[in-house]
């Protein structure tokens, strides 16, 4: 059982079919900030991250690249680990679901649930989305066929399967949500989960026989055809990482203080996971905190949509800590955020440069000019008690905000003391005080500013772990549990010290530093003109159709695409404006005259065949960068689509 001196913080384990983008970095950075705060406040902390490596999706991705699933998983898992290492993410363990210990632990859990009657064998028939590794009831499918989550076509799967008696946990889950109002954060998300569970839970198919790349069932069950459902395997990582089923040395970190996740996987964490834990007779996590999506042009970022922003590029260009601050400050936890360089630059120049960096410069300037760099806090309370009270009132609000996962508000509140400090300088004017011979008052003002900077540096450290120690060094102290206790808990001021000059921490940024990562820049980047379609017109005709040679046919580039965005062209009866993923750096914009037969909704998420090397043309003011293949007769028009889902960009011919 976890004591209150321990804190276990987790990220989701990332699928190895995608390279890390800023969405993944966001989850990991929030978790890192929480883990750092937790350690600084004296809790024994265990921070877990890792990769999710089994399942049909991974097996297929590996095959498409001519690699074994293990080779492929090794490669992509390492890219995640390297990124987190380069970002200084303070994880205590990086788990991989292909780790032997993990697999043993999952088998043990299966056995326990089987032995207590929560797992039984039956036949499953349903619509399965390979991409989301999820079965969907017919009623949830789009057009009776497509996945409601990702829009890709589902396949009907009928197979023998083991089931987990999820239906038996409906009332227990509802009782848990009821007794723990903060178990799911933000609280609005808890209501969504409750409504879903109240709608009724079906038993969950938890094994597959249609592929191999997964954890086998325990030997005692003796059913080698089956591998475990990837979500059962994946969720168990939170306990196998602590040694469940093998060396249980770290199990006293359980239950988790918080599982940080994105809202896309809330159902798995807030329904399946607690039900599995109840079946195992284990305690439930304290909080499951679901953040929103980072979008680009309003779309969730993902590799399959080709709209990802590389976190390494952003951090290299703008500074890792600046990027961390931006991500955590810019978007209310739980809400979605659209990435823009402009917003990032504004945060750096304004919050960090003007409010924080400049305050340190003002302090260095004042103490240098009047006191040879000395700062003394002895008389701060005598002259500036009102300011101190205001600062402490803000600081007192911080921990509850953090525990409620209101990180953007935590940072907002943390900026109030900086405003108090900047205002105090403007109001009391050290230069006037010095002119009037009020040296003691001017020194106290110095002490006040230094104390505020020191307190802010300590509380900002979890978010900006590289920058804040530099501020602390300038102010003659180190950030650790002892200084956190003195400056934050005990509300003390700094001892006397001589300030160290530091180069400016946040040099002003005048213009975007990245061309590639900005959605608006990218949209404005002219596309290379495609080769003109040169199908000859002078060939002999048969029944009115020009005959062409095979080489001429191959001059036409036909490709499979997935419609990732679809909208109506205003004022047009015929046109839809589509963004079609052709596996290129960004989706193609195609204006299609199909609105009489297809709505934008009909098209979204479907696959189409595209003439990909047409000269761009403008239709009703919109550039069209391709054409869709369709067949039209007196009954109307229908799209030509691949019979089975194909990767965007797959050539046709
Ligand atoms: O779901 N914006 O892995 P995953 C914000 N393996 N966050 C995003 C994001 C976006 N655009 N895209 C991804 C899985 N994320 C499973 C998890 S856990 C037992 C198994 C974040 O790699 C978000 O937190 O597809 C999401 O939940 C997580 O990445 C994992 O995504």
Image (cartoon, grey):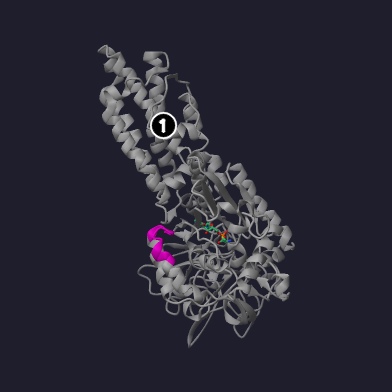
The C terminus sits in image quarter: bottom right
Disc 1, SS: helix
- Residue under numbered circle 1: 487
Q: Residue 633, image x and y in percent?
A: 51, 86
| Image-based side of 528 in relation to 267, left or right | right
Q: Residue 533, image x and y in percent?
A: 60, 66
Query: Considering depth in this image, is 539 or 587 the residue closer to the camera?
Result: 587
Check residue 184 for magenta coloring: yes
Query: Considering depth in this image, is 29 or 614 the residue closer to the camera?
Result: 29
For residue 190, what is the image quadrant? bottom left
Other residues around mark 1 within 10 Å, as few (<14) / some (14–19) / many (≥20)? some
Specify the segment rendered in magenta.
176-187
Query: Considering depth in this image, is 550 or 245 the residue closer to the camera?
Result: 245
Check residue 327 for magenta coloring: no
Q: Is residue 11 above or below residue 479?
A: below
Q: Residue 597, image x and y in percent?
A: 45, 80
Q: Is residue 210 visible?
A: yes
């Amino acid at each position: 059982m976890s004591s209150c001196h321990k804190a276990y913080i987790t990220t989701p384990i990332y699928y190895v079919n995608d390279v890390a983008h800023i969405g993944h970095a966001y989850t990991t950075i929030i978790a890192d900030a929480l883990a750092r705060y937790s350690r600084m406040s004296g809790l024994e902390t265990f921070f877990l991250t890792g990769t999710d490596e089994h399942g049909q999706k991974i097996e297929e991705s590996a095959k498409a690249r001519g690699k074994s699933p293990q080779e492929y998983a090794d490669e992509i898992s390492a890219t995640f680990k390297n990124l987190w290492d380069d970002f200084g993410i303070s994880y205590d363990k990086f788990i991989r679901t292909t780790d032997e210990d993990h697999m043993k632990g999952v088998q043990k859990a299966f056995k326990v649930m089987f032995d207590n009657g929560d797992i039984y064998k039956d036949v499953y028939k349903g619509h399965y989305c390979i991409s989301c590794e999820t079965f969907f009831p017919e009623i949830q499918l789009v057009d009776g066929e497509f996945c409601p989550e990702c829009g890709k076509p589902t396949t009907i799967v009928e197979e023998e399967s083991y089931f987990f008696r999820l239906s038996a946990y409906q009332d227990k889950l509802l009782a848990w949500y009821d007794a723990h109002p903060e178990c799911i954060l933000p609280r609005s998300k808890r209501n969504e989960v409750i409504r879903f569970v109240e709608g009724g839970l079906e038993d969950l198919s938890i094994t597959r026989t249609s592929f191999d790349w997964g954890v086998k069932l325990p030997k005692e069950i003796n059913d080698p055809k089956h591998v475990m459902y990837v979500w059962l395997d994946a969720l168990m990582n939170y306990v196998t990482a602590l040694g469940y089923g093998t060396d249980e040395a770290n199990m006293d970190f359980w239950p988790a203080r918080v599982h940080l996740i994105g809202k896309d996987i809330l159902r798995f964490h807030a329904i399946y996971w607690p039900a599995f834990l109840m079946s195992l007779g284990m305690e439930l996590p304290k909080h499951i905190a679901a953040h929103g999506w980072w979008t680009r042009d309003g779309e969730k970022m993902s590799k399959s949509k080709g709209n990802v922003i590389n976190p390494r590029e952003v951090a290299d260009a703008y500074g890792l800590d600046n990027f961390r601050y931006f991500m955590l400050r810019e978007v209310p936890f739980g809400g979605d955020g659209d990435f823009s360089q402009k917003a990032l630059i504004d945060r750096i120049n304004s919050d960090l440069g003007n409010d924080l960096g400049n305050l340190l410069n003002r302090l260095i300037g004042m103490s240098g000019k009047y006191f040879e760099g000395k700062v003394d806090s002895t008389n701060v309370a005598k002259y500036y008690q009102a300011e101190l009270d205001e600062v402490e009132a803000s600081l007192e609000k911080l921990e509850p905000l953090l525990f409620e996962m209101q990180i953007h508000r935590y940072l907002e509140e943390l900026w109030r003391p900086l405003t108090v400090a900047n205002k105090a300088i403007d109001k009391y004017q050290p230069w006037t005080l010095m002119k009037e011979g009020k040296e003691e008052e001017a020194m106290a003002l110095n002490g006040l500013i230094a104390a505020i900077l020191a307190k802010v540096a300590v509380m900002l450290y979890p978010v900006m772990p590289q920058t804040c120690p530099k501020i602390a060094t300038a102010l003659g102290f180190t950030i650790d549990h002892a200084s956190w206790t003195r400056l934050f808990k005990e509300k003390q001021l700094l001892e006397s010290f001589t300030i160290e000059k530091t180069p400016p921490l946040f040099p002003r940024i005048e213009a975007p530093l990245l061309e590639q990562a900005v959605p608006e820049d990218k949209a404005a980047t002219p596309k290379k003109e495609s080769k003109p379609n040169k199908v000859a017109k002078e060939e002999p005709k048969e029944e009115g159709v020009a005959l062409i040679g095979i080489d001429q046919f191959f001059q036409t580039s036909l490709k499979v695409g997935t419609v990732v965005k679809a909208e109506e062209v205003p004022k047009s009866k015929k046109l839809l404006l589509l963004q079609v993923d052709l596996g290129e750096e960004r989706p193609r914009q195609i204006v299609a005259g199909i609105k009489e037969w297809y709505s934008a909704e009909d098209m979204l998420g479907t696959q189409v065949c595209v003439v990909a090397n047409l000269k761009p043309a403008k239709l009703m003011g919109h550039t069209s960068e391709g054409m869709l293949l369709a067949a039209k007769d007196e009954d109307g028009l229908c799209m030509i689509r691949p019979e089975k889902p194909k990767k965007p960009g797959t050539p046709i011919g």
